[in-house]
Amino acid sequence: MAQCVMPNLNPPLTTVKQCLDYKSRLQALEPNVTFLMSLYLHSSITPETIREAKNAGITGVKMYPANVTTGSSQGVTDYAAFYPVMAEMEKQDMIFNIHGECPSGGDITVMSAESAFLPALLYIHQRYPRLRIILEHLSTAAGVSAVEACGETVAATITAHHLSLIVDDWQNDVHCNCKKKLTETIANAKPVAKLPEDRAALLKAAMSGNPKFFFGSDSAPHPIAAKKGGDRIAAGVFTQPYATQLVLNALEQGIQRGILKDEDVTVEKLKGFLGDLGRRFYKVENTPRGEIELRRGGDRIVHVLQTDEGTLQVVPFRRGERTWSMSWVGEED
């Protein structure tokens, strides 16, 4: 099993040594998982850093526009300053993961932030056509169209919560709220969920079989304390324990709304979206270790997950709701 690791820690992972040290800590916890590490694009990153990272087995670099989400305070304000870094990434065949939003201000709001970023995506792809780019956690129909318009080196991830939510959900329910300035935002995420037509476009892309679109959980297990009160509530939705089931719930709802048909959701397309297509884009070897068995409505999402000693508590997305049960058939990674 492979797991992509994001670098927006505090402090962020801006050096190869930091990445490798963090990987060692993760590997000690889960020795059977292959961790795909990324550097945080920062003013200290140079083409030489990229060469060092490639030689150390680091998979890619993540770009966060400054101050658009959790852990982005040291992010990018001027893309052009990093053109030499992008050129070296292209040369070294590394992944360029992008949080594709512009900061709010002027005519740009959380609802238009992704669409406002898309010209930059298209320009970077035009300038570096062999650079493998992933537009992370896609949230708009415009984003789907932009990725489709690019060559085969540009792809996008889609989350379970963006397949499920629209603006009214996070506006009216604090537990699905994607804004940052509320009393409690247990399911706060950036980019925010948008309009019904955006959700429909994401559902169709997910089940299109197009190798440009695959699952990425963007799961962020922020403690309850970080999700309540204050002006800077941590952005991030915790979906990992139920990620597969939440995707299936969203697809079922898509069928009920008439966005998808039963025949659109096949085992082959599910396998592609949830695993095969992402592995192929990342060039990760597929080593099957059994299959999963899913049963409709056989499980309920817990209200709180906590450490054994109870000192750290995290609330999962869709807490308390019925979902599919999942079990492994054969050997699990």
Image (tube, grey):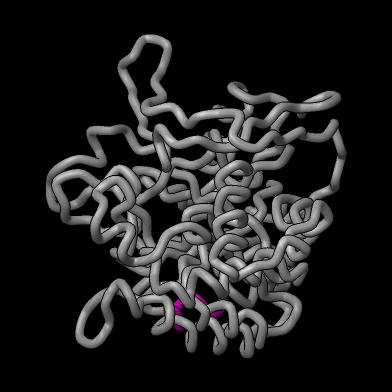
Q: Residue furthest top?
A: 309
The reply to whether residue 77 is visible in this rendering is yes
Numbered range of the magenta stretch = 79-83
Q: Is residue 176 magenta?
A: no
Q: Residue at x 25, y 75 (%)?
A: 104
Quarter residue 19 falls in = top right
Q: Position of residue 216 (x, y in %)?
A: 59, 54
Q: Looking at this view, is 249 or 183 the one in front? A: 249
**x, y percentage for residue 242?**
55, 37
Give the residue drawn at x 71%, y 57%. Answer: 273
* Residue located 65% across and 67% down the image: 260
Q: Is residue 331 above or below residue 210?
A: above
The residue nearer to you, when weighing 124 against 20, is 124
Q: Is residue 43 left or right of residue 145?
A: left
In this rendering, the answer to whether 199 lies above or below 311 is: below
Q: Is residue 58 left or right of residue 293?
A: left
Which of 195 and 4 lies nearest the eye of the viewer? Answer: 195
Q: In the image, is 280 to the left or to the right of 104?
A: right
Residue at figure coordinates x 47%, y 54% from the top left? 161
Quadrant of the snapshot with the C terminus: top right
**Quarter occupied by the N terminus:** top right
The spot of residue 325 in percent (x, y) is: 63, 31
Asked where in the image residue 130 lies, by quadrant, the reply is: bottom right
Residue 93 in the image: state x and y as whole percent.
73, 66
In the picture shown, does residue 105 fall above or below 243?
below
Asked if residue 85 shows in the view, the reply is: no
